[in-house]
Amino acid sequence: MTAVVVEHVTKVFNKGRPDEVTALSDVELTVGDGEFVSLIGPSGCGKSTLLRLVADLIEPTTGAITVAGKTAGKARRDQDYGIAFQQAGLFEWRTVLRNVELPLELRGLGRAERRARAEEMLALVGLADFAGHYPAQLSGGMQQRVAIARALAVQPPLLLMDEPFGALDEMTRERLQGELLGICAKTGTSTVFVTHSISEAVFLSTKVVVMSARPGRITAAIDIDLPARDEAARQSERYFEHVTAVRQALRGVPAESAP
Ligand SMILES: Nc1ncnc2c1ncn2[C@@H]1O[C@H](COP(=O)(O)OP(=O)(O)O)[C@@H](O)[C@H]1O
Ligand SMILES: [Mg+2]
C-alpha cells in the first residue's frame, strides 16, 4: 500500500478575497511504503501547508489526497499517522509518560496497555529514566524526543514531521537524526519530513522533494542513494554530490546541467 498519494492538489487561502494566496499549485507527490521523503524549499513555499493537507488539518481547494489507500480524513480518524512539529507541543501539566500516553487514551486503550506502550516508546527515544518528569524539567532536545515518542505511540504506519529539529543545536540535531532513522528502520514507518536544511534532508531521506515559492509547487524530486546513514556517510563523496544536486535544484538549475 502506498503511504501517501497527492494528486493535482492546489490550495488557495482566502479565496476570492483581496488577501487570496495560492499556497500550492498542482502538487503531485507519492510516498512509498517505508520511504523517507523530505520537503525542502524557501520559507513560504507551502511545505507546512502540504503536510497539513496530508494530515487532514486543512482541506485541498482542488485535487485529492490518499493516505494508506484511504481519504486523508479517514486516515486521520483511524490514527494512521503521527505528527511532530517544530515546537514539541507537550502538555506542561502532564508528566512525560502521560504526554506519550495521550494518543493511546484517545484511542481508548486500557491503563496497563497504555503505560506499557508509552514506556516502550520512551525507551526507544532514550528517555526511560525521565517518565516521571514534567516537560519544563527537560532540555529542548529531550522535549522533542518526547514529542517523537508520542507521535510513534500508536505505532502509526506514517510519520509527519514539520521541522521537528529546527529549534535544536547542531549536535543534538545530528544525534536525533540518527535516532529517528533507527526508529523508522526498526518500525518500518514511512515519513514525510519538512526541513529547510539541505544536509538534514540528504542525510535522512530516500527522496528529497524540492519546492519553489509563489505559487508553491514541486520543482524536483531527487532520489538519495547512500550505502549507509552513519557518520562516515556524512563525509562521503556521494553525500556531497547529493547535497550539491539539491542545492542546485533549489536555485533552479536543471539537474542535467549540473556539473
Ligand atoms: N491559514 C492560512 N491563511 C492564509 N494564508 C496562509 C495560511 N497558511 C499558510 N498561508 C500562506 O501560504 C503560503 C505557504 O505557507 P507555509 O505552508 O506555511 O510555507 P512554509 O511552511 O513552506 O514556510 C504562505 O504564503 C503563507 O503566508
Ligand atoms: Mg512551515
Image (tube, rainbow, N blue to C red):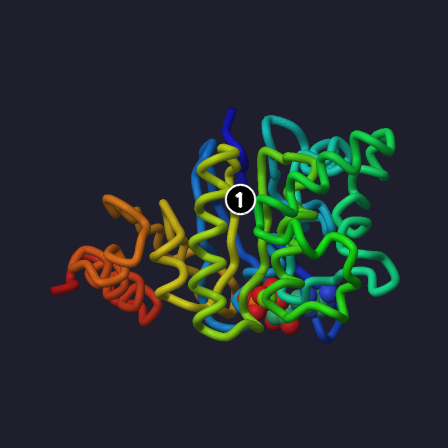
Quadrant, the C terminus: bottom left
Q: Nearer the viewer, residue 218 or 91?
A: 91
Query: What residue sits 72% from the left and 41% below the top?
Result: 118
Q: How many marks?
A: 1
**Position above or below: 249 against 222:** below
Badge 1 residue CB within 8 Å of ligand 1: no
Quarter occupied by residue 182: top left
Mark 1 residue type: His
Quarter occupied by residue 93: bottom right
- Ligand 2 is found in the corner quadrant, namely bottom right
**Position above or below: 231 against 27:** below
Q: Which residue is mark 1?
A: 8
- Residue 96 located left or right of residue 195: right
Residue 81, how many percent across, how many down? Answer: 65, 39
Tell me, yes or no, if residue 43 can be seen here: yes
Tell me, yes or no, if residue 22 can be seen here: no
Query: What residue sits 50% from the left and 42% below the top?
Result: 183
Residue 206, how many percent across, how many down? Answer: 36, 45
